[in-house]
Image (cartoon, rainbow, N blue to C red):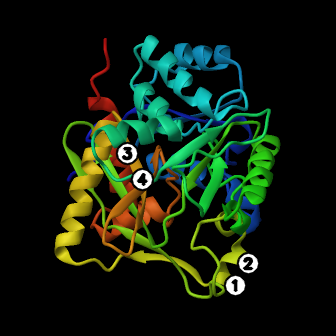
């Protein structure tokens, strides 16, 4: 696919603390890590010949409105994962862009809303007969009461906070006391309701998808922990996600999932069904658990996943013969072609 032939006026939208500097000179990998995605995206868009206007915001829509009036962008490249410090508000930020009739990259407001609430997305997928874990939601206040149908072991996490926040090996609980303790920790640590899901032993598989109506799936990746202690749960903890030294200690890598051709075809079809059932658009990563009986259970749907060069989503695209500049070009095209209500 040839890149877009015309120069675009692009507003790159990001958290105010993650606006990258113009140069990386003198910076260490640790310095760069927090805003590496924002830098990779902005620098690559410039290399593609586009005019890039970075904008960092926190909780003031006036800053965004002023930038839209000043820049008059052809499209907003959206890299916001929260607004005003709240993850669920990212959907409202995109709604504002739609109200202003501005093109943007990534997922639409409805898809963000459905995917963000893990309980709601599970209910929708269960209606479509897609395998999902059994679950219960526990709001703050009062002792958690586990439904009789919900058997241990359970994985306890936030209902809507992402990034593996609050997830550790202790998140897999096996009795009532551990459940109560973990639910209380999630309430205290994330300020959100907790969801306890049936813990499914098995392989962890990630599938990247792109598209609005016509969907393309990338090469499935598998999370592999070569030095996982015996008996420890095979889960992506917060420490594993963000601590490079711990990743090395655990022998963590994501590599192409070894799947039989029939299983891979089934996974791709299942992924596309999920993407459509949750009204997703743009691009997303779906996280699955492959159980011993061969069934794929969706764990989470992640619209607008990390686009850092070399990370999972970009690496899966690379394995599918789509290099990083082409990946961003494809995301731009999908944003320009998304048919909003207007």
Marks 1/2: CA–CA distance: 6 Å
**Lower sequence index among marks 2 and 4:** 2
**Mark 2 Cα shell of 10 Å, populated few (<14), some (14-19), many (≥20):** few
Q: Quick check: marks 3 and 4 in contact, CB under 8 Å?
A: no
Left or right of 105 in this view: 43: right
Q: Answer whether labels 1 and 2 touch (C-beta < 8 Å).
A: yes
Q: How many marks can you see?
A: 4
The spot of residue 119 in percent (x, y) is: 51, 39
Is any atom of residue 259 visible in this view? yes
Front in this rendered view, residue 206 or 29: 206
Q: Which residue is mark 1?
A: 249
Residue 285 disc label = 4
Label of residue 245 in the image: 2
Quadrant where the C terminus is found in the figure: top left
Q: CA distance from mark 3 to mark 1?
A: 32 Å
Which is more N-terminal, label 3 or label 2? 2
Q: Is residue 210 above or below residue 61?
A: below
* Secondary structure of the residue carrying numbered label 3: strand
Check disc 1 and report its element: helix, strand or loop.
helix
Residue 283 is marked as 3
Position of residue 82 measured from the top left corner of the image (x, y, whole percent):
63, 34
Q: Nearer the viewer, mark 3 or mark 1?
A: 1
Classed neighbour count for the residue bearing mark 4: other residues with Cα under 10 Å, few (<14), some (14–19), many (≥20): many
- Tell me which corner region of the image, top left, top right, bottom left or bottom right, holds residue 177: bottom right
Whether label 2 touches label 3, CB < 8 Å:
no
**36 on left or right of 98:** right
Secondary element type, mark 4? strand
User: What is the spatial separation of the Cα atoms under label 3 and label 4, in whole angstroms?
Assistant: 7 Å
């Amino acid at each position: 696919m040839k890149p877009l032939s015309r120069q675009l006026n692009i507003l790159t939208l990001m958290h105010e603390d993650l606006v990258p500097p113009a140069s990386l000179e003198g910076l260490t990998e640790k310095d760069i890590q927090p805003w590496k995605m924002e830098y990779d995206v902005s620098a690559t868009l410039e290399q593609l010949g586009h005019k890039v206007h970075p904008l960092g915001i926190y909780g003031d829509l006036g800053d965004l409105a002023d930038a839209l009036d000043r820049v008059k962008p052809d499209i907003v490249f959206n890299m916001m994962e929260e607004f005003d410090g709240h993850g669920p508000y990212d959907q409202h930020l995109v709604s504002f862009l739609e109200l202003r009739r501005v093109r943007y990259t990534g997922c639409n407001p409805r898809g963000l809303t459905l995917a963000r609430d893990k309980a709601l997305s599970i209910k929708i997928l269960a209606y479509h007969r897609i395998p999902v874990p059994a679950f219960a939601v526990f709001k703050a206040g009062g002792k958690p009461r586990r439904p009789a149908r919900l058997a241990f072991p359970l994985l306890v996490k936030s209902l809507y906070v992402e990034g593996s926040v609050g997830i550790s090996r202790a998140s897999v609980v096996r009795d009532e006391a551990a459940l109560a303790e973990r639910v209380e920790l999630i309430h205290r640590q994330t300020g959100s309701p907790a969801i306890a899901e049936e813990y499914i032993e098995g392989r962890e598989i990630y599938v990247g998808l792109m598209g609005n109506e016509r969907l393309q799936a990338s090469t499935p990746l598998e999370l592999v922990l070569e030095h996982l202690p015996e008996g420890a749960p095979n889960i992506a903890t917060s420490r594993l996600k963000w601590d490079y030294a711990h990743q090395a200690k655990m022998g963590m890598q994501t590599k192409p999932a070894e799947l039989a051709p029939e299983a891979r075809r089934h996974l791709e079809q299942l992924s596309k069904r999920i993407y459509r059932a949750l009204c997703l658009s743009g691009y997303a990563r779906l996280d699955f658990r492959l159980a011993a009986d061969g069934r794929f259970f969706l764990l989470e749907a992640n619209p607008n996943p990390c686009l850092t060069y070399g990370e999972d989503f970009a690496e899966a695209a690379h394995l599918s013969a789509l290099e990083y500049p082409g990946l961003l070009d494809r995301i731009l095209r999908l944003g320009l072609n998304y048919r909003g209500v207007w």
